[in-house]
């Protein structure tokens, strides 16, 4: 039986210390703990065991293969396989539930020739990578989904294979539980400072808010929107900041006769089925960094922006009732909205798993596996994640991914 989470570490030294115990931190901890070649100790430091204000708690928990780069497609393909075969990946443990996966797909809509061409180019890359994406003309979309208003639409990309909603919280809960059963230690505490060696090329110790000082072999920054704050403790700057994202759950008086794909409207607003309800989301009009503790909602956005747009795109949504809403944070990478993973170029034992910009849940299986390989073997063995290394941040060389939401 798992004991309650302590506030104090049991040891004075750990081989790997993960700062942040939400989805990505727990993915790293679990993959390390199940890697038979890894023989070290693991400590996960999480300041809030309720995860109330984490990106994990506010996620819409969706996965897609519709990216414009092969590596991002491959990352999601592993994620989809992991979700569908979760119990098997968890060692066949009969306590582990089957994870619900609703493959209603994504629907990217284009209202201009330039974006339509971008979608067609992306579809070629996705098809070569094994994804089931199809480019559809407006009349083809209308044939399959007659509820859309498509007078302004030229075409769209759609994929019904391994795209849609999954119960990410089940993965998260079982990663935490299984990692702890396998020896990973979780504590409710906070890293407040890091001390490096004389050369400055390695973090030697971490000081906790409670006053304890622990020695470290490797440090993993899994701090979500607070990643920049954690990196600064080691004298490192990364372009990751909290950006607010709004989610709205609504009921429709006139429901659709089939699942609503996760539809990305040309305005940037997205919507999808959510059980018997529907869900919509968007960024604020002025998309800037916010305070780490700012989760204030803006109901003007729902009333004056989201509702009119979704009602225009789907006339059956003219009569709807808001059921629930919340504001969460993206861990937004301002350089290129892609992950930062792997070691720092100078502080060699400082590892990143940061800046996912809304892709963290769906990419967490591949990222946890990849970082566990890098820590254990000194290299990626399953999937080469080096395009997301810190070196591109240092050199100001964005990794261009055109399919971002």
Image (cartoon, rainbow, N blue to C red):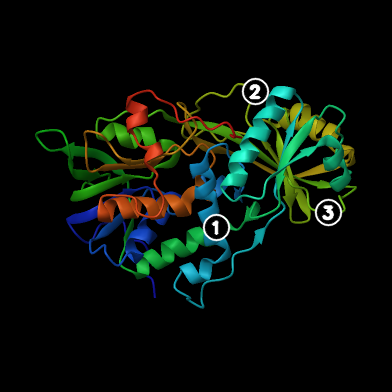
In this view, which residue lies farthest toward the bottom? 94
Residue drawn at 56 percent across, 32 percent down: 244
**Where residue 383 is drawn, which disc sits there?**
none
Label 1 SS = helix
Label 3 SS = loop
**Where residue 169 is drawn, which disc sits there?**
1
Is tag 3's residue or tag 2's residue first in the polypeptide sequence? Answer: 3
**Where residue 285 is drawn, which disc sits there?**
2
Which of the 4 image quadrants contains residue 286?
top right
Q: Nearer the viewer, residue 324 or 256?
A: 256
Q: CA distance from mark 2 to mark 1?
A: 29 Å
Residue 270 coordinates in the image, percent (x, y): 70, 38
Q: Residue at label 3?
A: 258
Q: CA distance from mark 3 to mark 1?
A: 25 Å
Q: Nearer the viewer, residue 396 or 250?
A: 396
Residue drawn at 22 percent across, 36 percent down: 347
Quadrant of image for the N terminus: bottom left
Residue 18 coordinates in the image, percent (x, y): 32, 50
Does the image show residue 263?
Answer: no
Left or right of residue 108: residue 253: right
**Crowd around label 1: few <14 · some 14–19 · many ≥20 (10 Å):** some
Label 2 SS = loop
Q: Nearer the viewer, residue 205 or 156?
A: 156
Is tag 3's residue or tag 1's residue first in the polypeptide sequence? Answer: 1
């Amino acid at each position: 039986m798992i004991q309650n989470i302590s506030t104090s570490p049991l040891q004075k030294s750990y081989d790997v210390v993960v700062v942040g115990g939400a989805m990505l931190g727990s993915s790293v901890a679990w993959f390390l703990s199940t890697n038979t070649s890894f023989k070290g100790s693991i400590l996960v430091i999480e300041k809030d065991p309720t995860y109330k204000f984490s990106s994990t708690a506010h996620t819409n928990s969706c996965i897609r293969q519709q990216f414009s780069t092969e590596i991002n497609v491959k990352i999601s393909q592993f994620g989809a396989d992991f979700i569908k075969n979760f119990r098997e990946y968890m060692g066949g443990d009969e306590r582990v539930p089957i994870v619900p996966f609703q493959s209603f797909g994504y629907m990217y809509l284009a209202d201009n020739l330039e974006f339509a061409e971008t979608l067609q180019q992306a579809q070629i890359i996705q098809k070569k990578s094994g994804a089931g994406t199809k480019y559809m003309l407006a009349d083809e979309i209308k044939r399959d989904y007659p509820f859309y208003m498509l007078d302004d639409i030229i075409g769209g990309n759609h994929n019904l294979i391994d795209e849609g909603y999954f119960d990410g919280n089940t993965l998260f809960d079982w990663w935490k539980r299984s990692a702890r059963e396998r020896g990973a230690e979780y504590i409710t505490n906070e890293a407040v400072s890091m001390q490096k060696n004389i050369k400055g090329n390695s973090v030697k110790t971490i000081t906790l808010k409670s006053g304890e000082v622990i020695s470290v072999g490797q440090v993993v920054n899994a701090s979500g929107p607070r990643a920049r704050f954690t990196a600064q403790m080691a004298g490192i700057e990364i372009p990751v900041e909290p950006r607010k994202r709004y989610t709205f759950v609504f009921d429709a008086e006139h429901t659709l006769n089939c699942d609503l794909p996760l539809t990305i409207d040309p305005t940037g607003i997205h919507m999808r089925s959510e059980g018997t309800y529907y869900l919509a989301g968007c960024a604020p009009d002025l998309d800037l960094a916010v305070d780490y503790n700012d989760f204030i909602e803006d109901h003007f956005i729902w009333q004056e922006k989201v509702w009119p747009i979704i009602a225009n795109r789907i006339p059956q949504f003219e009569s709807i009732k808001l059921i629930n809403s919340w504001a969460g944070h993206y861990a937004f990478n301002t350089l290129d909205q892609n992950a930062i993973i792997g070691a720092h170029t100078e502080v060699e034992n400082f590892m990143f798993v940061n800046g996912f910009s809304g892709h963290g849940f769906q990419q967490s299986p591949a990222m946890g596996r990849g970082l566990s390989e890098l820590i254990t073997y000194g290299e990626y063995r399953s999937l080469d994640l080096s395009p997301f290394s810190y070196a591109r941040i240092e050199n100001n060389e964005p990794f261009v991914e055109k399919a971002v939401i």
